[in-house]
Image (cartoon, coloured by chain):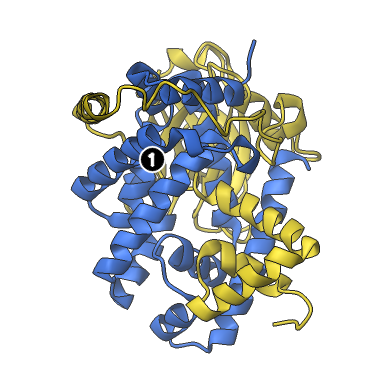
Amino acid sequence: MPDQDEIDLALVKRVCAGDVEALGQLYDCYGKFVYSLARYIMHDASAAEDITQEVFLRVWQHAKSFNPERGRVRTWLLRIAHNLAINEIRRRRVSPVTAHEATLQYVQLSQADPDPQNDPAAALQLQAQGVLVQWALARLAEPQRRAIVMAFFEGLTQQEIAAALDVPVGTIKARIRMGMQRLREFLQEAYGQ
Amino acid sequence: MNEQHVEEVLDAYVLGALEPDERSFVETHLETCAHCRDLAAVSRNTEGALLLGVSLVTPPPSLRARILQSVRSLAADQAATSSSSLSDGPTVLRSRMPHDLHSKGGNAYAAEGNPALTLLARLMATPDCRIWELQSTGANAGAYARLVGIPRNREAVLVASGLPILTADSVYQIWLLRSSYPMSNATFHVDATGSGQQIVRASAALRRFDAITITPEPAGGSPAPTGPIVLMGNLHHGL
């Protein structure tokens, strides 16, 4: 039985050959993840729909450029979504207050609305991995988590984060470096590596 | 930044947190330094995991159809302008991608020393795995948890975070509700960050239960809930 990477790769090849239904299958597996990432970054359901649509249009148009040696299909999709969303909020430029609220929202997952009822098995496994990542993030010290979230999900540079939080930029650099190191350790612990 | 290497800023680099001149410096360095490229790949793996670290929200059902309609329109336009544009097949798809942090089989996820995480890893690798959200009841807005299990089975793992730290003579207790009757389950503690994991072993298949709640109780647990519900989830949702 092929693993999910092989299945995904086969779908991308079919997309390359002009198979719209293959794109639909990729959407079935990863559409919710793409939409959720975009919505989380944008705080805007309508913008998240537009970004999700743009992601899959780009997959359709650029499937031939996908190089499996550089990563997995799902990571490719999510990175496109991340780049589009970050570019958009940088264009809109969030305020420090919004950034702070977003950080708080990140750890308050009570608004989550997963609906795994119709999700394929691959998506459910991915959701479980997401649980581990959230668990690892929740274990970080709050200043480290906040710095990472503001950088990655809000598109702020270290200098911008330092200005928003009114702390020296060296402090933010240390928080990001140490936070990411801790995150790696937590994930390795979770994955038994 | 180290004159020889850029390893100290690679995490900020993959997160997109460097200023343009810093980013340019790093990218130039990576072109010629295999050592830092290897480290950047490690950072990139962590960044890839972060992409999954958001709460899931179900997109509108109409979105799928809208996207595929757009693609069909685009395909029709492409066909009209170039009948051979999509007929060449993949040109860059050369091989299976190398395995990374998340690409190992279920056994490789085993978390040494933590039975809950070991079971969680095993469940994750199961196609029938389901996730149920536990919502905060409001008093502790930062608290959340998820139950990961297989509906037809009795075992699951509760992963909780953001819970208030209790005094030494108290524990959190899990309750599985069936016909509104709370059935006592495991107790657990949280660490200094308010996080905890606990294996849940139900008296029947998980799908037989209606809901799950968590309350603070005296150490050792209670035969019936006495504390306020801090988290609760609907077990029908997602079955």
- The 10 Å Cα crowd at callout 1, few under 14, some 14 to 19, many 20 or more, is many
Asked whether the viewer can see residue B218, the reply is no
In the rendered image, residue B68, in percent from the top left (x then y), is placed at: 26, 25
* Residue drawn 64% across the image and 71% down it: B28
Asked whether the viewer can see residue B7, the reply is yes
Mark 1 residue type: Val
* Residue drawn 51% across the image and 71% down it: B17
Q: In which quarter of the image is the N terminus of chain B?
A: bottom right
Please name the color used to draw chain B: yellow
In the rendered image, residue A27, in percent from the top left (x then y), is placed at: 37, 28
Direction from residue B98 to residue B16 in the image, left or right: left
Direction from residue A46 to residue B132 in the image, left or right: right
In terms of depth relative to the viewer, which is nearer, A24 or B129? A24
In the rendered image, residue B134, in percent from the top left (x then y), is placed at: 41, 38
Direction from residue A184 to residue B237 in the image, left or right: left
For mark 1, give the secondary structure: helix
In terms of depth relative to the viewer, which is nearer, A160 or B39? B39
Q: Mark 1 points at which residue?
A: A34
In terms of depth relative to the viewer, which is nearer, A26 or B110? A26
Q: Is residue A79 above or below residue A141?
A: above
Determine the image quadrant of residue A35.
top left
Direction from residue B146 to residue A38 in the image, left or right: left
Q: Quadrant of the C terminus of chain B?
A: top left
In the rendered image, residue A60, in percent from the top left (x then y), is placed at: 36, 32
Q: Which chain carries label 1?
A: A
* Residue drawn 67% across the image and 48% down it: A187
